[in-house]
Amino acid sequence: MGRCAGGGRCWLVHLSDGTTPGPVQEWGVPPDYATNGQLLAGDVNGDGLDDIVARGTCDDQECWLVQFSTGAGFAPPTPAGDGAYFSDSTGALGIGLADVTGDGMDDLVYRGLCGQRRPCWRVQQSTGAGFASGMSWGNTTGFAASTLAFGFRTGDLNGDGREDVLYRGECNEEECWRALIASPDNAFMARYWGSDALLAAAASSGGFHTADVDANGLSDLVYRVDCETGMCWDVMLSTGTGFMRAGSDPIIDHVETRPAFLKHPERRLGTTALS
Ligand SMILES: [Ca+2]
Ligand SMILES: [Ca+2]
Ligand SMILES: [Ca+2]
Ligand SMILES: [Ca+2]
């Protein structure tokens, strides 16, 4: 978000040619977002173009707003549903925009409140035009201090086409990677996904990310760590049932091959492929 050439706020976009960002383009006007909002990018209507979702105001009430990408700009914001029930930990853990149902349209997932205001993993499925009312996908926790510090990320860890939730938590009183595997029954199944991590060193460098680094359809885990030559990437590849460290050398030190932390690097934002 920045200033348009003519003044006022603008979405500014640099379309990538695959390796480098192109010149800046103006892509429309952002709405007035709610102050506690988080800006999310994902494909809400499944047309292959990433859209923008945020909390805003509709008729003096907080609501979800979506700005659909036209391929050459973002359309004006349209109401995309309400029914958000946030919990005390929603802000710290973050909100995901990920296709947990596997229909090609990104859904909202967050730690919120469900029936009788009990904490739950709350999912609002995309309808293609907005989001349906929230559903409880279970209440698995296993949180550790690092869960709140790093939040959660989404990605398809087991390659079944449904994006899953990943966070650093606790398994059998030890820190571990906890995966919440999205099932066809509209529920998350908690799975141990390994324990190995140098993540503590990465606390000051942006936490962890998911990206399919080896392009096998399974989302992997990447984060920055200190190494002898400066900052490096530590990569843990998903096997479909857990993480294993990439190669014999624990640290991948090729900044020029850094993974793009775009949710859908294969998709197109405009006329030029992002990668
Ligand atoms: Ca779209
Ligand atoms: Ca979906
Ligand atoms: Ca999955
Ligand atoms: Ca992979």
Image (cartoon, helix red, strand yellow):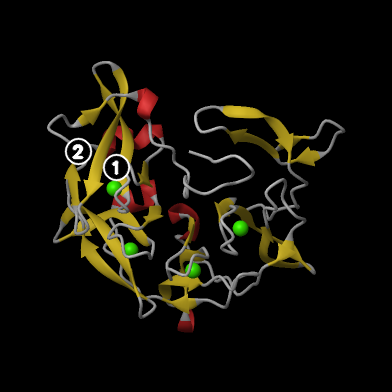
Q: Quadrant of residue 27?
A: top right
- Name the disc covering residue 214, or none: 1
Circle 2 SS class: loop
Reading the image, the residue beneath label 2 is: 246
Q: Position of residue 104 (x, y in %)?
A: 49, 65
User: What quarter of the picture does the N terminus occupy?
Assistant: top right
Picture residue at 60% right of the left edge, 46% below the top: 269
Picture residue at 34% right of the left edge, 46% below the top: 212
Locate residue 148 relative to residue 275 in the image: left or right: left
Q: Residue furthest right?
A: 6
Q: Position of residue 148 (x, y in %)?
A: 38, 52
Asked if labels 1 and 2 touch by Cβ distance under 8 angstroms, the answer is yes
Q: Nearer the viewer, residue 39 or 51?
A: 51
Picture residue at 36% right of the left edge, 24% below the top: 255
Q: Nearer the viewer, residue 176 or 45?
A: 45
Residue type beneath disc 2: Ala
